[in-house]
Image (spheres, rainbow, N blue to C red):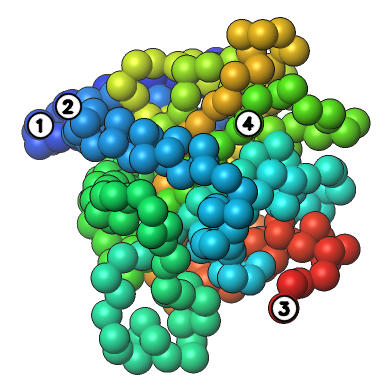
Amino acid sequence: MKLQHVPTIDLAPYFEGTAEGKRKVAKEVDRACKDIGFLVITNHGIPRQLIERVYNLSREFFNQPMAEKRKVDRPSPDMVRGYSAVAEESLSYSMEEAAPGDLKESFSIGPIDVPEDAYHRGPDAGPHFAPNVWPETIDGFREAYGEYFGAMSDLARSLMRIFALALDLDEHFFDDKIDKEISMLRTLSYPNMGTRIEEGQMRAGAHTDYGSLTIVKPDDSPGGLQVRNQNGDWVDVPYVDGSFVVNIGDLMMRWTNDQWVSTLHRVVNPPLDAEATRPRQSIVFFHQPNYDAMIECLPSCLGADGQAKYPPVSSGDHLKSKFVKQTTFGGSKQEVA
């Protein structure tokens, strides 16, 4: 029977390092990725103090006046850095679906301490290693974000190794495809709902994620993350204290020839009462393979006919096309010079 709700998976047996423990976790992850594409992970090894530090500094940033936040505005639609205000993005457009702008604001960074070499700075790199922009008024902000990015990168590498085992590959199969990752860290702030809402407007419209996997630190407040299961029902992602939510993205679905599902999800509006209208915040790490990693059907995932469902695509080209749609509202909104 297929899972209809998001399972919670304890990673401790994997990190203990025994073959039996790794097999146990890989089997549970494989089922979750096949059935619903989401899982909640515990015993992940990320210090609670680091999570709380980034959360609190992010709240301090979002609580600033708009003029201060605008000093670190996003430079261009294909450059995911800096600040984006409420309704300046619509995730539904990445799915070719028209919808009002999302009821969220965000702050984003990319890779830290990028080498000054041809791979990272040459023309093929495009916007993927663009400089980060940092607020200058919040002490410790840059350091905390840098530390958190590194911790998420390490956790994502472990998850990709679990994925490899689940797909009957060598545990380190993905290592050389993610060693120059173009991942992004975004903090999302969903303001209180005491403002006018357009018809069809949500905190985040229904979408799938673009990369290999996403790691989310959600907030325990009304108006949360929902996933559409294979029956077509929207189900809440459970909040487990100290956990992360993980979901696979479009590239992992392509790699596995649709054996694993990149699932539609959304962030719903809370009911309009005094308690539910308070702000919500999430910290999201979008793991993205090296820009030149070619995403094509894995040998272990070819169907009986030996055919791949998707043509090969590079990680970088796929990501750039999705973000331009998201930030220009499918091209209906002109890029700002």
Residue located beneath label 1 in the image? 16
Q: Quadrant of residue 43?
A: top left
* Kind of residue indicated by mark 4: Pro
**Foreground tag (3 vs 1):** 3
Mark 4 Cα-neighbour bin, 10 Å: few <14, some 14–19, many ≥20? some
Q: Position of residue 39 (x, y in %)?
A: 44, 28
Q: Could you say which disc has been placed on residue 51 in the image?
A: none
Instruction: Give me the C-alpha separation between circle 2 and circle 3.
Output: 51 Å
Q: Could you say which disc has been placed on residue 13 in the image?
A: 2
The reply to whether dot 2 and dot 1 touch (C-beta < 8 Å) is: yes
Instruction: Give me the C-alpha separation between circle 4 and circle 2.
Output: 38 Å
Residue 311 in view: no
Choose the circle earlier in sequence order: 1 or 4.
Answer: 1
Residue located beneath label 3 in the image? 337
**Element under disc 2:** helix
* Kind of residue indicated by mark 1: Glu
